[in-house]
Image (cartoon, rainbow, N blue to C red):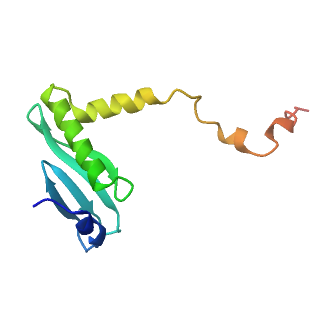
Amino acid sequence: MMLSDMKCKVARPGTKLQKLSDGGGLQLWVQPTGGRLWRLAFRFDGKQKLLALGAYPTVSLADARQARGDAKRLLKTGVDPSQDKKERKAGAWTGPSAPSPVSLWPGWERRPAPTRP
C-alpha cells in the first residue's frame, strides 16, 4: 500500500525503528528519537544497497518519489545511484576550503607573532 502525506505526518516514534513502505523500495524510517528519514532500498551488482534521500518534511513525499524514479532510471542504465550521488556531491563544492578555527577568532590578524627571548 502506498503512503499518503497524512500517514507521513502522523507517524509517531516508538521504541524501535519503524519502516513505512511506499513501494518500489522507497521507505520512510521513523526513528525512536523522532526523526523521519527517506531511504531507498535497491540492488546493484547483486548486492543490497541503501540510498539516503533526506529528512521528512524537508523532502516531501512527492520529492522522494521523484528521487526514487531518478534512481530507478540510473539503475536501468547500469549506474549505481549511491556512487552517482557521491560523485555529484564531491564535484559540487567549488568554493575555498573551510576556514581554519584560528581565522575565525576575532582579531587574530592583529596579534603580533610571539618573540623568543
Give x and y (percent) for residue 10.
28, 72
| Image coords of residue 84 (percent x, y) | 29, 30
Q: Residue at x 21, y 47 (%)?
A: 40
Q: Residue at x 26, y 68 (%)?
A: 6
Count the labels in the image.
0
Question: 40 or 117: which is nearer to us?
Answer: 40
Q: Is residue 25 above or below residue 2?
A: above
Residue nearer the viewer, 22 or 13: 22
Relative to 52, residue 77 above or below: above
Q: Residue at x 78, y 46 (%)?
A: 106
Q: Kindly identify the residue that appears in the image at 23 percent across and 68 percent down.
A: 7
Q: Quadrant of the N terminus?
A: bottom left
Q: Quadrant of residue 22?
A: bottom left
Q: Is residue 79 left or right of residue 63?
A: left
Q: Quadrant of residue 70?
A: top left
Residue 53 rendering spot, x and y as whole percentages = 30, 47
Name the one closer to the observer, 7 or 27.
7
Residue at the outermost right position: 117
Direction from residue 15 to residue 44 in the image, left or right: left
Q: Which of the image's four quarters has the C terminus?
A: top right
For residue 50, above or below residue 3: above
User: In this rendering, is residue 108 above or below 22?
Assistant: above
